Amino acid sequence: MKKTIKETLSNKILSALIIPFFGIILLNLVFLANYLFQNLADSFFLLILSSESYASFNFEIFPLLKHLLFLGTILVASWLVFKSKLKALYKAVYLPVPFATLLATFVFFLYPNTLIINILGLMFFAATLYYLHVKKKPWIYYYSAILVALLMFVSNILGDLGIL
């Protein structure tokens, strides 16, 4: 049975509401998981290293290593999600996770160089849009990518202004 224009429009509106709502919830859960991952990694390495060794190791390379390990975990999980047979809506809800995690990693290591952060974020956003275009993905992927890019950009700017 063919869908009417009203049904199609209501499905699109519902999708447009679902993506930011569940995307933000999922993103917050991922950032909470990142926090727990960082604390568990600290605890693990504090157990196997002496206090002096840990302090030296933690200062030099450990923060970078922890963030890159978590980012790698998110990227592998993302690859699995996007290669799965899940519906496009579920994948679009998940899209903010790898996107924002990568951008947050840029911010963590490059702050206060917000110009570089914004340029890298814009390049990643453009590459994402290009990939979506080449793969002929549905509109909800574009919508999700635009939402998370705007959210990260605005939070970066507001952070510079001291508002966030």
Image: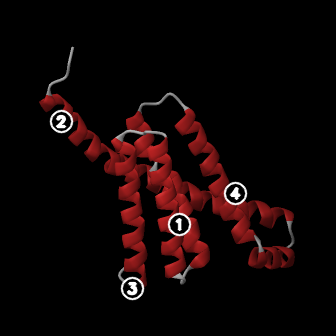
* x, y percent for residue 149: 41, 62
Cα gap from disc 2 to disc 4, whole angstroms: 41 Å
Give neighbour class at mark 2: few <14, some 14-19, many 20+ (Cα, 10 Å): few
* x, y percent for residue 156: 43, 75
Tell me the quarter of the picture where residue 137 sits. Answer: top left
Residue type at mark 3 is Gly
Cα gap from disc 1 to disc 2, whole angstroms: 34 Å
Which residue is rendered at x = 76% and y = 60% of the image? 44
Does residue 82 appear to the left or right of 151 in the view shown?
Answer: right
Q: Which residue is mark 4?
A: 69
Asked whether residue 62 appears in the rendered view, the answer is: yes
Does residue 134 appear to the left or right of 163 in the view shown?
Answer: right
Marked residue nearer the N-terminal end (2 or 3): 2
Marked residue nearer the N-terminal end (3 or 4): 4
Give neighbour class at mark 1: few <14, some 14-19, many 20+ (Cα, 10 Å): some
Residue type at mark 4 is Leu
Cα gap from disc 4 to disc 1, whole angstroms: 14 Å
Q: Which residue is mark 2?
A: 10
Residue type at mark 1 is Ala
Tell me the quarter of the picture where residue 65 sits. Answer: bottom right
Judged from the image, the secondary structure of the residue bearing numbered disc 3 is loop
Tell me the quarter of the picture where residue 62 sits. Answer: bottom right
Relative height, residue 62 to residue 128 (above, below):
below
Labels 2, 3: front one? 2
Marked residue nearer the N-terminal end (1 or 2): 2
Does residue 73 appear to the left or right of 65 in the view shown?
Answer: left
